Image: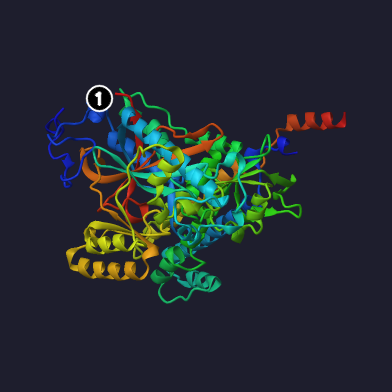
Amino acid sequence: MNDKLDTKNLVLPSKLYKAYWLGRYVERVDSVARALLSALNSLKHLKSEEPLMSLADSLGIEFIKHEKFIEEILHGDIPSSILYAVRNMRTNAIGLGIERLVRESNILVIAVEERPDLQKIDEVIKHANDVIAAINNVGRVINEEIAPPEIPEDKRQKQTRHQQQ
Amino acid sequence: MHVDSLPSQSIDFSKTESHNEAIDGNLMIREEYRQFFKNIQNPRLLRLREKAMSADLTAYLEGFTYNVKPNEYNAVPMDFVPRIISRKNFQVIEDGIKQRAKALNMFLKDVYTQEKTIVPEELIVGSEYFNLDLIGHLPKNDIFIQVYGADLLYNGDTYYVIEDNLRVPSGVTYPVKIREMSNRYLNVLKKGYKLEPYKPWTHLYKAMRDSSWVKNPFMVLLTDGPSGAAYFEHMYLSKLMGIPIVETGDIYVTDSGHVAAKIPGEGEVQIDVIYRRVEDLDVFVPGLTKAYIDGKVALVNSPGTGVADDKIVYSYVPKMIQHYLSEEPILQQPKSYNLTIPEELEMAIQNVENLVVKERGGYGGMGTVIPRDHPKSKRVALIEQIKKEITEKPDNYLLQETLDFSTVVTRESFSPLIMRDSYVDLRVFSYYAEDGPQVPPGGLSRFARHGRITNNSSGGGVKDTWIVDL
């Protein structure tokens, strides 16, 4: 039986588990980063801290000053911070051993580790946008490397006929 | 070629008392390095700095890292200035490592078949790596140490073995990765050199296959996972060899005593050979050692090999070579003090300041203290503490003479050209298959950033080792 195995591409339970957590962390980073960006735009254009306070509330982070909260959500040593999530995501990517995914994960971590001047709201917004762009790249690589290949319509028909024979 | 032909102040010499492998006492560049220095000064060579930066960044992004704490990874510091060793010198190393591999393997066979050895029995039984359960069990072809890594120092005349690594020696992929990066970005540095290819994984693959009782074995690499310090190496080796990498949770011992993995979509798959990169096998995979003893799975390296890389047993290796092979040792060892012998303990106490103190079970620089590298203000107290500890627990330490070993030039910057001299050691690997031990031409050269300790954790870096015909 072992002779027929494609030993280079075996999907081991530990790999499946990592793929699951990789996806969860990507989702978490994506949703927190987008929510943060939205709240930052409210702060900039509407001069309202309420969306940030609401985000802090939903993540269980105490809101005292918006600069402190932004630092905590970006780089805090807490499970709900973006840095915490991207580092965990990277560990799972490294565990999967897919080179492109490791590379994009490292780029994402580097993007998050940047320290914007929290007094300058435009700089923080740019930072959040950079992080989201890096997350999008990770998502694209996941699609290309892990998702099953799409079968073109013409091949799908041939396959169906073949199966009918 | 004189150093003055290089841009001024491009090499910072601070360790003039030691043998520099690239530049001699008259500041002439040694033969092995002349072409290299010509290459980096080629006026048509553009963007060398950018190429080196690209290589550094690419390696980091591709995961050439070591784990510092959970989920945090540091780039392995690479140096693209190679360590260059002549084929003539490497032949001595190769012959010496093969000789040691054979003798150590024969010693392990005697240990686990309860033959009398030249090492006092209490030292063997007292080793934390001696495994009583393995008595009477012989692996296929009596080969216990398929993978062996020896740490060497050079003083300009002689190569000294300072440590044998027989359990899970690591670092073999580092020079492979550096060479991959330099092939991609800095191939111009090799112009004029005819390098011997360095493909240690082909030897490892063969040694693994030869370790199995099965004709076409299903082989895997067992890792402690991406939070382990050497995960890059595990993943990279598994890719180079084309074998699956498995974590401890992936495999288990079946009711029939075989080792298996449950593969979604494939069912239970029997594993025949495990290249294990973890210790404490039975903690992670209960019953694994028994499966090995029952011949249901081959383990590379065998469990219990650590008894031969025990620091005190190391001091007996020259005698092992004489005893088992009736040969004189090709490679030297620094003078060691076996503290369980009262006269040697007394001599060591008299001379602690000039010795290296090694904990018996330590490895990879852990548990190693070099008193003379400590600031004078702290040295006296340190020496007193060492004297007290070695007197109380003489069988827990080995003391060795401190060697004045060689330096190499390492890159600070390619543009402008700035180099410095750094102490360097060399880890050479041997792979033991049916046709005997094989030593691929190359190895891991580790250089120290500060002092003489070359480990990553002490700020050391790594470089490729070129074996060249002159």
Which is more toward the observer, B46 or B468? B468
Where does the image place residue B413, in percent across and percent down from the top left?
24, 41
In the rendered image, the quadrant that contains the C terminus of chain B is top left
The image quadrant that residue B380 belongs to is bottom left
Residue B461 is left or right of residue A97, and the answer is: left
Instruction: Judge whether B228 appears above or below B64 on screen.
Output: below
Number of labelled discs? Answer: 1
Residue B434 is left or right of residue B415, and the answer is: right
- The chain holding disc 1 is B
Q: Is residue A64 visible?
A: yes
Instruction: Judge whether B265 appears above or below B209 on screen.
Output: below
Q: Residue at x 67, y 41 (%)?
A: A148
Which is more toward the observer, B81 or B136? B136
Q: Is residue B186 visible?
A: no
Residue B82 is left or right of residue B305, and the answer is: left
Assess disc 1: are there few (<14), some (14-19) or many (≥20) residues with their C-alpha within 10 Å of its C-alpha: few
Q: Amino acid at mark 1?
A: Arg
In the rendered image, the quadrant that contains the N terminus of chain B is top left
Where does the image place residue A94, in percent across and percent down from the top left?
52, 49
The image quadrant that residue A112 belongs to is bottom left
Where does the image place residue A45, in percent across and percent down from the top left?
43, 63
Which is more toward the observer, B329 or B408? B329
Q: Which residue is mark 1?
A: B44
Which is more toward the observer, B381 or A130? B381
The image quadrant that residue B341 belongs to is bottom left
Where does the image place residue A142, in percent across and percent down from the top left?
58, 46
